[in-house]
Image (spheres, rainbow, N blue to C red):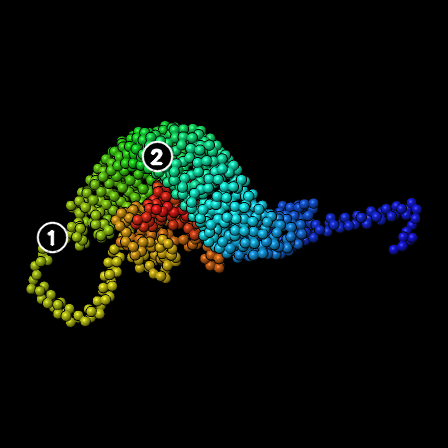
Amino acid sequence: MEFSHFPTGIFAGKQSLYLILLLNFIPIFVTSQSPATTERDTLLKIKRQWGNPLALDSWNSTSSPCSWPEIECDDGKVTGIIIQEKDITVEIPSSICELKNLTFLNLRLNYLPGKFPTFLYKCSNLQHLDLSQNYFVGSIPEDIYRLGKLKYLNLGGNNFTGDIPPSVGNLTELETLCMNLNLFDGSFPAEIGNLANLESLGLEFNEFSPMALPPEFGKLKKIKYIWMRDTKLIGEIPESFGDFENLELIDFAYNNLEGKIPSGLFLLKNLTMMYLYGNRLSGRIPETFDSSKLMELDVSNNYLTGTIPESFGGFKHLEIMNLFGNQLYGAIPESIAKIPSLKVFKVFRNKLNGSLPSEMGLHSKLESFEVSLNSFTGNLPEHLCAGGTLFGAVAYANNLSGEIPKSLGTCSSLRSIQLYKNQLSGEIPSGVWTLVDMTSLLLSDNSFSGELPSKIAFNFTRLEISNNRFSGEIPVGISSWRSLVVLLASNNSFSGRIPVELTSLSQITQLELDGNSLSGELPADIISWKSLTILDLARNKLSGKIPAVIGLIPDLVALDLSQNQFSGPIPPQLGVKRITSLNVSSNQLTGNIPDAFANLAFENSFLNNPSLCTTNSLPYLPSCNNAKVANSKRLSHRVLALILVLAFAVFLFSVVSTLFMVRDYRRKKHKRDVASWKLTSFQRLDFTEANILSSLTENNMIGSGGSGKVYRISIGRPNEYVAVKMIWSDRKVDYILEREFLAEVQILGSIRHSNIVKLLCCISSEDSKLLVYEYMVNHSLDGWLHGKKRVSLSNKVMDWPKRLEVAIGAAQGLCYMHHDCTPPIIHRDVKSSNILLDSDFTAKIADFGLAKILEKKGELNTMSAVAGSFGYIAPGKSKIQS
């Protein structure tokens, strides 16, 4: 170009200036507009590849991506994508890495399928990657280190399997690594210890191969949060973990860690939460501490010994102290009662003794106080509810004496008082009966006295006062106890008639008034007890006839009217019911015993009723046909001739008889086998034990495990099945375990909740037990969570709204087991395979309460673990072994 061609002078100078400005303006315009258009086109292409989901309606060609809710920008450039809970079901498009400035990608809580998207390696500036709570499968790729700029990686809540590759240790910029809630069945690498910048590590809820904590983890000097709950850890907690100066949370719950708790953990000044429960830790709790910020301490369900350190009173910010399920002894230090932030205090199932701290509850807003199954003496603390927030006072199975503090009668937050099996006395504070939120009052096996009130709180569902000194009549006002489900008042001094108003308790399932001085006749209105399963009125002074309507109570399975003064016949309606436990002994009954009870299962049900008889030939019951027996001894000649003819016939057909001998033997054997089984039902059944026993075949078996085999059995009508769990097969039990088994099954069978699988009945013999449950057509939850475990290929993986419904249902079932069952039932193995789904996908807890039932002779009694305590104890896999 020749500059001589340009104009000269002032005009030429102005033109040159305009030209220079124009040339400089053009590239600026291009660089600021063209990339934005390109990024918008890329995002719209991604939207199309995802099927144009309605959730991304704001993505259009007329607006800037920086104005879209899911997009983050910096200086007009797309740097972040946040698409959470948008129901995306298609794989991530590889075109996403055309966004060259992308540093932040969050696609959690969708339905993204497939393997880990390795094309993300092309997103060269990516620093934050969150693909959690999706449906990714397969293994983590070995070359994941190519995402070298990552500071945050969250792959939790997917279906990844295999090992976590050692190459993860090459992501040296990582500050957060989350791999929790997957299906890993291999190992996690020691190379994680190379991540010098790591602050948060989440590996919890994976089925790793059992392994110890690598010593290399001790190099994580910046670590703040460690989540490794339920990862099959073994060995000891390294002492080096006591050097993590920045550590705020450590969670090693539900593993198999052994040895002592490193003393250094209690010297970490920033530690706020320590969860070590459900392991096999032993030794004493460290005496020294400097964890002034500690808020939650849970070392429950271990093998810790020694005393509770006096220094624990120095935890000024401590809100939760769970020490239950250990072997601690000695007294509770008085200083603990002075912790100003203490809300939850649980030390049940230890070997503690002495008096309870007198100021407990006075200096903090205490919510839960649980000291059961120890050897405490003295009085209950007077100030437990001084903060006005107490909802559970649980101190059963101790040696406490004195009276219930009157202050509990004004504690409006209180929901449950459990003080049974102590030496308490006096009257119940009047205010306790009318506390608005009160649901259960469990006071059996004490020396309480007084009379029952006419009115109780509306939410009252359970009252247990057996084996006390209560007296007076059952109040007419009992008709106001509308919500009552269980009333146990055996062995007191109640007198008078059973008021007809008692029959208005339509929700009652268990009523036990045996061992009192009740008199008069049973009211005919007992037919209104539609939900009643157990009725025990034995050892009273009741008289008159047994009402025929008692046989029409639909769910009645156990009836005890023994040692009264009943007269007249046994109502034939009782024989129609599937009553499995009946006792009418020691009355003045007359007439014929219904044929349904003329078998060995009821041989002790009719004793000491001289005027009762049976038409069946049973050695333990008198026959109604004795008058005809003498005549049968006189044989006429005609009869003698008939005998000779019959004998000759037998001789002629002996060969034919031999052919049928095997068949007859098998039939008789089958009858004996069926007769050796006893059925105990917990509600009305449409099948018999014979229906179940005949269907225990390999073709009907749908599962097996450590506790036995499970069968799916049709009960006659199309598409109606029950699930049968067989336990104790081929192993005889002694008499004590047999009684304990029946007692445990009665408890489990009495449970009625929409989120707990119903135990329909138990069928038992000398060496085998069958538990018959309602059948869940949609099987277990884990088959709907993980693609590789689905019931069939036609079943879709469960969506997140449905998961939430299932989680809520399971939580409601657990809450009922913990708060409303007596004794409270702690599952101890809650997992997705133990949550079953009915035809409407309603969650139901299964396999609960089996720990005691499956206990073998010679093992440590674990019922205290099952009975547990009031309130919530996170279920897990801890085992109490000798």
Q: Is residue 157 above or below residue 383?
A: below
| Quarter of the view holding residue 646 | bottom left
For the residue carrying disc 2, how many other residues have a C-alpha within 10 Å: few (<14), some (14-19), or many (20+)? some
As drawn, is 682 to the left or to the right of 389? left
Mark 1: give few (<14), some (14-19) or many (20+) Cα within 10 Å: few
Residue 54, image x and y in percent?
Answer: 60, 50
The residue most toward the left is 637
User: Residue at the spot x=65%, y=48% of the render?
Assistant: 79
Q: How many marks?
A: 2
Element at label 1: helix
Q: Quadrant of residue 589?
A: top left
Q: Where is residue 569 drawn, in percent x and y?
A: 20, 46
> Mark 2 belongs to which amino acid?
Asn
Q: For mark 2, what is the residue?
A: 353
Looking at the image, is 349 positioned above or below residue 662?
Answer: above
Residue shown at 66%/48% (left/top)? 78
Judge whether 669 appears above or below 124 on screen: below
Amino acid at pointer 1:
Ala
Q: Determine which quarter of the picture holds residue 144.
A: bottom right
Residue in front for this viewpoint, 775 or 70: 70
Residue at the (44%, 36%) spot, across then down = 287
Tell me the CA gap for discs 1 and 2.
68 Å
Q: Is residue 148 visible?
A: yes
Q: Is residue 106 visible?
A: no
**Which disc is residue 627 wearing?**
1
Residue 228 image offset from top left, x and y in percent? 49, 47
